[in-house]
Amino acid sequence: MLLTITTTYKPATDLGYLLHKNPAKCQEFEMTFGKAYVFFPEATQERCTAALLLDVDPVGLVRGRRGSIMSGLLDQYVNDRPYAASSLLSVAMTQVFGSALRGQSNDRPELAGTAIPLTAKIPALPCRHGGDVFLRHLFEPLGYKVEASRLPLDETFPDWGEGPYFAVEIEKTTTLKDLLTHLYVLIPVLDDNKHYYVGDDEVEKLLRKGEGWLASHPEKEAIARRYLKYQPSLAREALARLVEEEDPVLAKEEEAGLTAEEPLEKDISLNEARLGAVMAALKGTGAKRILDLGCGEGKLLRELLKEKQFEQITGMDVSVRSLETAHERLRLDRLPARMKDRLKLMHGSLLYRDRRLEGFDAAAVVEVIEHLDPPRLAAAERAIFECAKPRTVVLTTPNVEYNVMWKLAESSQKFRHGDHRFEWTRQEFQAWANGIANRFGYKVTFLPVGPEDATVGSPTQMGVFRRD
Ligand code: SAH
């Protein structure tokens, strides 16, 4: 298994300082799965190449694993581990190029932070799913020039056709740290075999190494899913946390608590009016299994718990802190078991399809959509109405027309809450909701919530979506 990194930065031999390796020497490192060697096949002022060669012992890899010897599977001994780039390469990179991966160089600290021309070559990279198209989708959005040629399954038997391996070259003027980091994350994404335990700390690693680029990568969902070896719960957690990372406003709001909305609306007990309206709509449907999407600190959950009709109640939110507050306020630890069993809190994001949300009778989405960036609203629409698709959806959002009643227009504040990305007029909300109903096979009715003014309507608008 081989990775080479070449630079034409002058003097090119500075690559040795960046990697903390002497170009004149071949160094050997013991790994749990074999040996790693670092050497420099070329090292001139104009051009320097460092090679990381892994000599993997496939038998050593399975030795000592409970049950593995007894299972007698031949492919545990005869496999592509020794030559195809895999997550073992990432493991070796952390051990052999650890400082370079962290962007540290004692001798050339400024060069470590400088973009230099770099080319990485991997002679055998497995791309079993998606081939070189997926490979390009991974590296090109990060600004790499990608060259990939598919290797024959066996060059002595051309009739056997092509194999799943590619000879790959990626090129970019970037820092060595970024190049190594991208390889560190994306090689295991291409490698579908599991050969290490994937636990919670892998989520941490992915988020740490993905800092600054993963949140905006168009393939971030596939990257998280594959990096975490198709463990949906871990991938979901990673994605939800990426959303938070990307969304500093949301993170700030979590710290401040959801206070800004309350003083403005308290005068008219709008909160209570809204909870009452949502409860009535939910009760009227006869629903037993209820979702509260974007449940926040659990005000609606508390009301739902009081009603025996609701046998199963699930609150979901992207903010862990809000969920913790909900857990405390509802005194979940102290509730009698019979009551506690009815309620589940879960961490997730409305921007992603989530199997856990399927099979519910009704969902409440109370004062949530206006917190989503308009370009992301479409993803939430599909997650709610196409994937989760409960029979009933009760959704509320502010009516911006009513803001004049609060003299918001005279202050610098545009919306009722600092984190609102938009607030709609009644017409805008109804056009949106009718569009959803048409697209996803629902019928929608509209109800005003709170005191109604003849000209500007009520402060909150509610849509009740039903599908047969
Ligand atoms: N429904 C609650 C909270 C409304 S505040 C109530 O009426 O009191 C908006 C909530 O939406 C916040 O708790 C916020 O964390 C949550 N939220 C924002 N974006 C989300 C997303 N993408 N997925 C799930 N919840 C989200």
Image (spheres, rainbow, N blue to C red):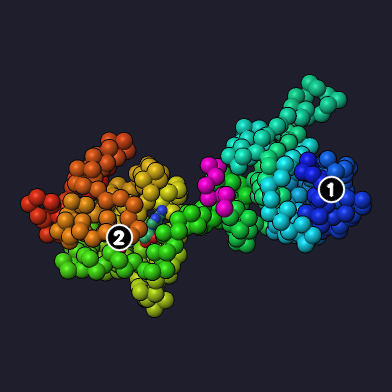
- Identify the residue at image location x=73%, y=29%: 149
Task: Give the residue number, with chain letter if any, for mark 2.
Answer: 417
Specify the label residue 389 is tagged with: none
* Magenta region, residue range: 212-219
Specify the label residue 13 is tagged with: 1
- Identify the residue at image location x=58%, y=55%: 211
Secondary structure type for disc 2? loop
Q: Report the quarter where the C terminus lies.
A: top left
Question: With 446 as the anchor, is 20 left or right in this view?
Answer: right
Secondary structure type for disc 1? loop
Q: Report the quarter where the N terminus lies.
A: top right
Q: Looking at this view, is 382 or 139 the one in front? A: 139
Residue 247 lies in quadrant? bottom left
Residue 255 lies in quadrant? bottom left
Question: With 32 as the anchor, is 347 left or right in this view?
Answer: left
Q: Whereabouts is ligand 1, in terms of quadrant?
A: bottom left
Position of residue 188 measured from the top left corner of the image (x, y, whole percent): 68, 47
- Identify the residue at image location x=68%, y=40%: 172
User: The residue under label 2 is which amino acid type?
Assistant: His
Q: Looking at this view, is 366 or 157 the one in front? A: 366
Q: Looking at this view, is 5 or 1 the one in front? A: 5
Q: Is residue 325 depicted above or below 124 in this figure? A: below
Q: Can residue 449 be spotted in the picture?
A: no
Q: Of tags 2 and 1, which is closer to the observer? A: 1
User: The residue under label 1 is which amino acid type?
Assistant: Thr
- Identify the residue at image location x=68%, y=47%: 115
- In three-dimensional space, the C-alpha distance between marks 2 and 1, rounded to whole angstroms, equals 56 Å
Q: Looking at this view, is 413 or 209 the one in front? A: 413
What is the magenta segment's predominant secondary structure? loop
Position of residue 58 measured from the top left corner of the image (x, y, whole percent): 83, 49
Farthest-out residue, left: 454
